[in-house]
Image (spheres, rainbow, N blue to C red):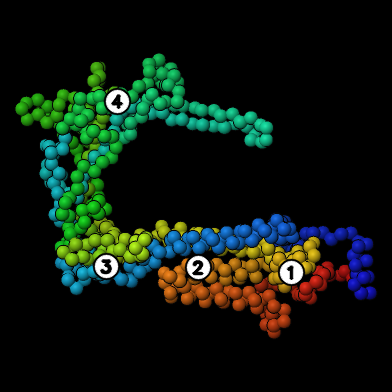
């Protein structure tokens, strides 16, 4: 008997199946069938190599770096918005001097609108339709548009040839950005397949008579704000002019043109049709206003109006509501929210917080999952390497022989994850950092307790993780399959 006889019996028999050994080390056959068994064998086998251990450590520390970056970049903004929910106060529509310097929420009628007059095509529009918060002008040109599609063919292996197929298609459409037809990839394709043998040429709008005229489209394609109210107010609070673009709902205006006579508003090459003001290129045989020609330009006007608005901002001297600035001088964070109609302060702040909070929690969960996976690969028990090597790389691997490494890996990952978050929050909010530190300490203590063999509570704790009965006594003692010797 003894160890010598045991080693002789083992060497004389068929070598162990690695899958059977790995199943014993992770707590027996998987309850999820062959697929889960193969997956568990794969992860355990990774832990039996230096490559797997190094990859697991890199993944673990990389995940901690990810959560640190997330907290340092996303936490300040979330902290400011959460702090705003605690600091905001309801204010009446008439400013109260006692609220100066405080974050206030007001829901009042908008007033001090501006009336936007004198714009081409709008001179005959009723003044009430031109009164609002701001007016936006969209200028588009009818032109050739090129669509380029690239497709690659080939296996991509070493020594293989990759072929690239470039397909171009062309069509005429309205576009708010000028496309230089001299830069088309395949002008011959456009000429032969899409334009009946004629060159596809987009005329330069600057060459048109009306382009920079006083009654012209403004001298530039695109979407532009034509004007905005100078002294817009909500209740008795004056809003900063640079921030009034957040208020109001848009409504499209209907331009009108009058030709002939001394009071003529539009030149002969201007027409109003379908909610647009058209500037026509020199073209003959135009059957209708829907018969567009290359070089035609159209303008659409949209006015923003509103009757009631809700504002969250800081009440400043002079009965002004301005951004509430928090954070450091190097990275200030401003809170200023405007919504149409009556919206509660809590809803406005939670809506502003939503996208940042969702992204932050996604990255938090991802980093915890990666940290757990990295530690699981490192802590997976290895029977193929010398015990001394395993102990040097992962002492916990010996302590979890005969049971799954998932529990200890999860606890250690959670402790590290919470610790990094606590460090990131320490200069932001002491209370949150304290809770995170307590959670990290609790997870680490539980990790230590579940991996010590000499504590009275170890049987109960090991049963929590679904461990089997002990099949390895300690460091250096081989794992023996039931019934062997």
Q: Residue furthest front?
A: 330
Distance between mark 2 and mark 3 Cα atoms: 29 Å
Number of numbered discs visible in the structure rendering: 4
Residue at the spot of label 2: 421
- Residue pictured at 19% horizontal, 68% vertical: 92
Labelled pair 2, 4 in contact (Cβ < 8 Å)? no
Say which residue label 4 marks.
204
Q: Earlier in the sequence, mark 2 or mark 3?
A: 3
Q: Residues within 10 Å of mark 4 (few under 14, many from 20)?
A: few
Quarter assignment of residue 111: bottom left
Viewer-nearest residue: 205 or 304: 205
Residue 273 seen in the figure: no
Residue identified by numbered label 3: 103
Q: Secondary structure at mark 2?
A: helix
Q: Nearer the viewer, residue 35 or 44?
A: 44
Residue 143 circle label: none
User: In the picture, which quadrant includes the C terminus?
Assistant: bottom right
If you read the primary sequence from the N terminus, does the residue marked by circle 2 or circle 4 appear first? 4
């Amino acid at each position: 008997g003894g160890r010598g006889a045991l080693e002789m019996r083992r060497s004389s028999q068929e070598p162990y199946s690695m899958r059977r050994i790995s199943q014993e080390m992770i707590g027996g056959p998987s309850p999820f069938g062959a697929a889960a068994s193969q997956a568990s064998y794969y992860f355990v086998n990774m832990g039996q190599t230096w490559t797997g251990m190094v990859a697991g450590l890199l993944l673990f520390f990389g995940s901690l770096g990810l959560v640190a970056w997330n907290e340092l970049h996303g936490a300040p903004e979330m902290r400011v918005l959460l702090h705003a929910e605690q600091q905001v106060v309801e204010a009446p529509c008439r400013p109260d001097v006692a609220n100066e310097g405080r974050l206030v929420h007001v829901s009042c009628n908008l007033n001090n609108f501006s009336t936007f007059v004198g714009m081409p095509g709008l001179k005959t529009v009723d003044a009430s339709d031109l009164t609002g918060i701001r007016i936006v002008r969209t200028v588009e040109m009818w032109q050739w548009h090129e669509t380029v599609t690239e497709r690659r063919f080939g296996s991509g292996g070493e020594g293989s040839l990759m072929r690239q197929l470039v397909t171009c298609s062309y069509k005429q459409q309205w576009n708010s950005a000028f496309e230089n037809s001299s830069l088309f990839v395949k002008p011959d394709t456009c000429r032969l397949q899409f334009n009946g043998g004629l060159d596809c040429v987009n005329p330069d709008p600057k060459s048109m008579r009306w382009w920079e005229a006083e009654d012209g489209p403004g001298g530039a394609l695109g979407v532009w704000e034509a004007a905005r109210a100078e002294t817009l107010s909500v209740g008795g609070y004056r809003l900063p002019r640079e921030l009034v673009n957040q208020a109001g709902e848009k409504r499209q205006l209907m331009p009108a043109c009058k030709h002939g006579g001394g009071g003529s508003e539009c030149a002969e090459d201007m027409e109003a049709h379908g909610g647009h003001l058209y500037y026509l290129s020199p073209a003959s045989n135009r059957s209708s206003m829907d018969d567009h020609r290359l070089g035609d330009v159209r303008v659409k006007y949209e006015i923003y109006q509103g009757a009631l608005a809700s504002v969250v901002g800081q009440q400043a001297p002079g009965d002004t509501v301005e951004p509430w600035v928090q954070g450091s001088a190097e990275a200030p964070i401003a809170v200023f929210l405007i919504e149409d109609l009556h919206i509660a302060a809590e809803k406005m702040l939670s809506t502003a917080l939503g996208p940042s909070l969702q992204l932050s929690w996604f990255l938090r969960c991802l980093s915890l999952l990666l940290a757990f996976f990295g530690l699981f690969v490192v802590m997976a028990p290895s029977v193929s390497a010398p015990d001394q090597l395993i102990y040097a790389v992962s002492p916990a691997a010996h302590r979890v022989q005969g049971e799954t490494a998932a529990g200890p890996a999860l606890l250690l990952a959670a402790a590290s994850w919470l610790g990094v978050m606590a460090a990131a929050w320490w200069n932001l909010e002491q209370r949150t950092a304290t809770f995170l530190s307590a959670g990290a300490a609790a997870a680490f203590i539980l990790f230590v307790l579940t991996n010590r063999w000499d504590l009275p509570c170890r049987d109960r704790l090991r049963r929590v993780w679904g461990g089997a009965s002990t099949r390895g006594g300690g460091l250096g003692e081989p794992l023996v399959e039931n019934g062997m010797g």
